[in-house]
Image: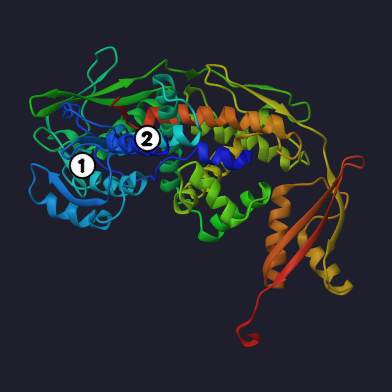
Amino acid sequence: MKRLLVVLAACGGAAPEAKQPAPPAKPAPAAVDVSWDKLEGPVKDVTVEAADATLAPKIQALLQGQIGKPLDRAALRDQVSQVFAMQGVGSVLVRGIQRDDGITLELDITPQPTIHALTAAQADGTSVPLPGQLAAANGLPLDPVLLDTVAGQLRDHFVSDGYPDAAARWTTKPVGSQVDVSLVVSPGTRVVIDHVELAGNAHAKAADLLKVMDLPAGPWNQARVDRAALQIDTYYYDHGYVNVSVDTPAPSATPKFTIKEGDQFKIGKLSIKDASPADEKKWLALLGVKKGDVFSRSAMTAGLQKLQDATKAADITPVTKLDPAKKTIDISFEIQKSVSPSSK
Amino acid sequence: MKYLLALMLLTAVAAAKPPTGARAIIDQPVAIVGGQPIWKSEIDDTIRAAKAEASPDVFQKVLDELIETRLMLQAADAAHITASEQEIDAGVQEIEKQNNLTDAQLDTALAEFGYTRAGYRAEISRQIRIQRLMQQELVPKIQIRASDSPVEFQMALETERRKWLENRKKMVHIERLQ
C-alpha cells in the first residue's frame, strides 16, 4: 500500500494552461457564512461577476456541465483554471450560495490590471536598461508571460557575463487600479576563470586535455564548462578508458576538473550475429578496428557507419561485454535488415 | 428512548444544513507559478489524502511541494514530455499488483482518500511525466549508476533535483497569495 499512499499524498490538481497571475490589489473576499463542504444539493446555476460583460456567457457555457451535479471541487477546479486562463482575467474567486433546492456557483472575476510604470534595476539600485519589448509597456495589461521572458533574458545576460548565480524577478505594487512593475536583477558574485586545473589525469597529458577542453580564461560560462567536461570524457573514451568519470567543478577562478580514469580497455572478440563466416570476415574488415586495438569510441562509431552503409542495415546494435580481469571488450554486432518495399 | 434518539438525529441533521442564502468560498488561488494558479482546494485535497492535520505549517509545506511539482510539470510540458494512456494503464496495474488489489478494491481505496479513478489516473500521468523529466534532465549528470548503488544513486538524484528546482525558482515567477 506504500506506493499507493505516496501517490495519493502527492495528488495535486491538473496543471492548467499558462496564463495571467492574480493582481496584487485584490479586494478582501465577502464575508463567508459557512464552510464550502456544508453546502447541500446539486449545482443549480452559475453566476458571474465581471467588469467585462463579454466574459459571463463564455464562463457560464464552460461551467454548464456542473449544473445538476453535486458540488465536485476537483472537477470544478479544472474548469475554473480554464477561466483563469482567459484573456483579461487576473484572478477568480469561486463562491457557493445555498439555495432551497441546491447551490448557486458565483464566480467573482478580478480583471488583469494595467501597468502604471515599469522599472528595471539591480538589487543595489543600479539601473538596468529596459529590454525593447517593455520600452512602451505603460498602460498595457500586465502580461506575466512576457515579464517572465524578459526576466529570463536579463538573467541570461548576467549569467553569460560570468554571474552564474544571477537571478531576475519581477514584482508588482498596486497603484489605484493599476500596478507598478519592478524587474530586479540580483547578479551575485562575478566569476572570471584565471586558469583551469586538472587532477587525476595519470595517463593523459594536461596539455592534450586542455586543448580538447577549449576553456580559455574569461567570464564563467556554465555551458562551456559542461562542454569541457564532456570533451575530457570523449578524450578518455577514445583512449580505451571506458569507465572514466569527470567531476564538473563549481564556479571558481581556478576550476579543478577531477578525473577518475579507471582501467584502459582493448578490443576483445569481434563478431557479427547471424552472419555467414564469409560475410562476417568481409564486414569486420570494414570496421577499421581489430582485436587487440585500444578501444576508441570515435573509431568504433566511424566503423559502425561504414558497416551500416555496406550492409544497408536499418540499424546495427553493438552489444558489448566488458571483461574487467582481461581488460577487454567483446563486441557483437546485431544487424537489423531494412525491409524492402517488395518484400511487404 | 428509540423515538428520542431518532428525534435527536433529525434535529442534528436539520442543524447541519446551512440556511438559504448562506455563502461559502469554494475555491481561490493561493499561489501563481509561471502564470498558472495553485488552488486552495489542491492543498485541502493533498492534506486530506495524506490524512494529515491541517495547520499553517502543514499548509505552507504542502504549498511548497505543489509549487515544486508545478515547476517540474511546466518544464515537462515545455520539453513536450507526455504520458500515454497505455503507460498510465500500466502504472495503475503495477500499483494494483504491488498492493494486491483488484480494480474494484482500488476504487474503494481511492474513495477512502476522496479520489476518483479519473483523478488518480491524472496523478499517475503527472508522476510519469515528472519521472521522465528527471530521467532526461538529471540522471545524465549523475556519475553513480542506479544498478551499482541504488541508495547512493537516489541520494545523488535528490541532490540534483534540489539544485534543478533552486535554479528553476530563479527563472519562473512565483507569487504566493497566502
Q: Within 10 angstroms of label 2, few (less than 14), some, or many (20 or more) residues?
A: few
The furthest residue to the right:
A326
Q: Give the CA separation, mark 2 to mark 1.
A: 29 Å
**Quadrant of the snapshot with the N terminus of chain A:** top right
Q: Amino acid at mark 1?
A: Gln
Q: Are marks 2 and 1 in contact (CB under 8 Å)?
A: no
Determine the secondary structure under disc 1.
strand
Q: Within 10 angstroms of label 1, few (less than 14), some, or many (20 or more) residues?
A: many
Determine the secondary structure under disc 2.
helix
Q: Position of residue A212 (x, y in %)?
A: 62, 35
Which quadrant would residue A20 be assigned to in this image? top left
Q: Which mark is residue A214?
A: none
Q: Is residue A70 above or below residue A243?
A: below
The furthest residue to the front:
B1
Which residue was labeled with disc 2?
Answer: B4
Q: Position of residue A240 (x, y in %)?
A: 78, 41
Which residue was labeled with disc 1?
Answer: A98
Could you tell whether B143 is left or right of A99 in the image? Answer: right
**Quadrant of the snapshot with the C terminus of chain A:** bottom right
Q: Amino acid at mark 2?
A: Leu
Q: Nearer the viewer, mark 2 or mark 1?
A: 2
Q: Does the image show residue A160?
A: no
